[in-house]
Image (cartoon, rainbow, N blue to C red):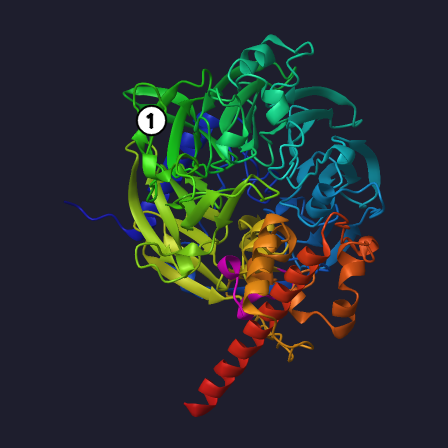
Amino acid sequence: MKKISGLAMLILLSVSAATVHAAASDAAPRASDWPLIGGNAEVWHHSSSTQINASNIEKLGVAWVAEMPSRDGLVGNPIVVDGVVYQSGPLGRAYANDVRTGKLLWMFAPEIDFGDKQRLISVWSLRYSRGLSVLEDNVYVAAGDCRLFAVDRKTGKQKWEAVSCDIGQDYGITAAPRVGGGKVFIGNVCVDTGANRGFVDAFDANTGKRLWRFYTMPGDPTQPFESKTMEMAAKTWGTDYWKKTRGCVSAWDSLTYDDKLNLLYIGTGSAAPLSPPERAADAGDELFVDSIIAVNASTGEYVWHYQTVQHDGWDLAAVSPVSIAELPIKGKQRRVVMTAPKNGFFYVLDAETGKFLSASNYTDVNWASHIDSTTGRPVTIADARYWERPGQASVVSPAVGGAHTWQAMAFNPATRLAYIPVSVTPTLMKLDPEAVVGGVSVDMYYGSKGDPKWTARGELVAWDPMTQKARWRVMRELPYNSGVLSTSGNLVFQGTAVGKFDAFAADTGKQLWSFDTHASMLAAPTSVEVDGQQLVLVATGNSGSSAAATNLARYTSTPQTRAPSRLIAFKLGGTGSIPATVVQEFPKPPLPRQPVELAKKGAEYFEAEWCVGCHGHGAENVRSSIPDLRLSSPQTHQQFEAIVRGGLRRNNGMPAFPHLSAEHLQAIQAHVINEAWNAYEAQEAAKAHSKSR
C-alpha cells in the first residue's frame, strides 16, 4: 500500500472538508471571520484553516493576552467579524477587542436594578451569560433580567432594547441569543421551579419588534389553547396537570437556525418539579419535555418534534447544541441534525421530518439500557427510577449534571466525526419533599466521595454519527471542560478545568500539544486567519459566568485555575507567557466550629433552599463576583440574619429570604462556618505536608 505524505493527507482532508461543507451550506464564512456561534450556520465549531496543523503544532505559542474587565471568567464562543472579537459577560455586558492586538475597543454595560422587582430567578440569571451573536452591524446580548439588547458593533452604543420574559413570573435568561433570517431568537429559564412554562421568542433583528412566540409546553387547560399543537401536547400531561406544575420545559440554551430549510431547532429542558410523583399521576410523555422541536422560523409554527426522554425524573434535558450536516446514510445523502444531550445518547435525526435515524450511548449510561431502534424511545432501568423506591437512593449516571450540556461539540467534515466534551458525574438521588427545587435531594459530588464503582471524570470523545461508535476517547481529570474546536489541519482543541489547553490529532486522538494557561476553561475556542496568519482564540479565567462553575466549583476548576478573566490568542511562533494564578489563602475563620449535627442540618437546608445555585455545593466558590461564603468576615456573620432574611445586600444582588426561620438561619450559618474551617484546615495541612517533604 502506498503511503500518503503528511502534506498530501492535509490536502486530502481539506478537499473532503470543502466538498462536504459545500453540500451543507452555500455561503461558508470567510476564514478571517467567525461570525456565528459555532463558526457557521451548521454549528460545526470547525475551522477550514490548515496553517496550524499536526506537523507544526509544537511551534504554537501565545500571540497576545487581553485582560478582560470581568470578575467572572467568560464562557461564550468568541465571535470575530471584520477584525474585532466579541464576547459577552454577566449583567448583560458585551466586550469588543481588536483581534490583532487584544486591545479592548469598547464595553457595553446596561444599568441593572437589583430592587424589589427582581426575583430569585432573575437575580441568579443575571450572573451568567453563555455568549452573544452578531448579525450585520449589530451585536445581540441578553441580560438575566429578561432583556435583549441590540448594540452597534462598531461603537458599542445601544440601538434597541426588548423585554422577552417577565421577571415577576420567575423567569430569567442565561442563553446566548441566536440569529438567522433577519431575526433574533431567545429562550429563557425558570431554574426547575415549575413556576411557569418556557417559550422561545423571535424578534426583528433591525427593530426589536417581537414577531412570534412558541411555548414549549401547554398552558392552563381551562383556557383556550394558543394552537392545535398545544392542545395536542396537553393530552400528554395528565389530569389536572396545571394544578401540579406550570413548567418549565425551558429552552434555556440550544437554538439552531437552519438557513436551508428555514427551520429553527429548539432544544428543551426537563419538567418541574423534577420528581415525577409531584406531577400528574397519570402523566404521559409530557410534551415537549427533553425534546428537539422544529418550528417554521418565519412564523413560529410547529413542524415536528422528537423526544429524547419521556416522563423524566433525572433532569436529562435536551438543551445541548444541535448541529446540521449532510451525511450518506444507508446509501442516501440526508440532511440531518445531530445532538448529544445530557442523557448520554448521541442522536441522528432527519432534519426535514424529525424522523429518528439512530442513537447510541457515547458514554456510560445506567438510567436506560438502550434506545429502541423501532420506536426511538429509551428503555429505562428500574434501579434508576428512585421515585419508585421511597426511602432509598439511586446512583444515576448521567443525571442532573448531564453527560454533555451547553459546551460546544465540534463536527469535522473531513473525518466525519463529532467531538464531544463529556462529563461523568455519578449522582445520588432520592425523594425529598422539603427540597425547594424539584422535590429531590441531589448529591452531584457523589462520584468524588470514594465509592470505587462511581468515579467522576471528564472525557473527550470522537464519535462517528454514521456507525454510532467512538473512534477514540481521551480521559480528563475533572468532569467539566471546555467546548471543542476542530480544524482542517487535522486538529482538535480543548481547554480543561485544570488549565491545560490541548491539541489532539483529529483522526487518531493522539495528543500533539499542550499549553498551561493557569486558568479554567469552558468556552469553545475560535480560529480565524488575520493578515495571512492563523490565530486560535480562547477565553479563560474562573468560568464564573457559567452556573456549572459556581454550582460545582470542584468539577470546573482548581484553586490554581480560578484565574482572572482573559482572552488569549495563539499563533505559530508566538512567544508570550501567562502568569501563574495566585491562590487565595483562607484566613482562620472568625467563629469557632459549630456542632456537627447542626451543621449537617444546615447543609441540607443549604441545598433544599437552593443556596447551592449561587454559592455552590459545600459553599465553595470560584472567586467570581458571587462571594465565597467561606471567606465571610466577622461583620458578615454579625449581619447574617439581616443579609439573608432582611435583604441588607439586595443592591449587591443578594435577594432576601424572609420565609426562613431562626432555626434554618442558625443551621445554615453553622454549615458555612464549618465549611470555612474545613477549607482552612485542609490548607494548613497541605502547607505542613509541603514543609515536611
Q: Is residue 510 left or right of residue 284?
A: left
Residue 297 position in % (x across, y down): 62, 19
Residue 279 position in % (x across, y down): 54, 27
Residue 453 position in % (x across, y down): 30, 55
Where does the magenta region start and end?
Answer: 554-566
Above or below: residue 192 compared with residue 129:
above
Quadrant location of the N terminus?
A: top left
Front residue of 106/662: it is: 662
Front residue of 22/264: it is: 264
Front residue of 340/29: it is: 340
Q: Residues within 10 Å of mark 1 (few under 14, many from 20)?
A: many
Please report the residue visible at 76 percent of the width from the left and 23 percent of the height from the top.
Answer: 210
**SS type, badge 1:** strand
**Quick one: which residue is furthest to the left in this view?**
1
Q: How many marks?
A: 1
Q: Is residue 431 left or right of residue 109?
A: left
Please report the residue visible at 33 percent of the width from the left and 25 percent of the height from the top.
Answer: 328
Front residue of 297/615: it is: 615
Please report the residue visible at 45 percent of the width from the left and 45 percent of the height from the top.
Answer: 429
Above or below: residue 546 compared with residue 149:
below
Q: Look at mark 1 in the image and give the residue it sits on.
A: 358
In the image, what residue type sits under mark 1? Ser
> Is 244 in the magenta?
no
From this viewpoint, is residue 527 visible?
yes
Above or below: residue 369 compared with residue 491:
above
From this viewpoint, is residue 545 visible?
no
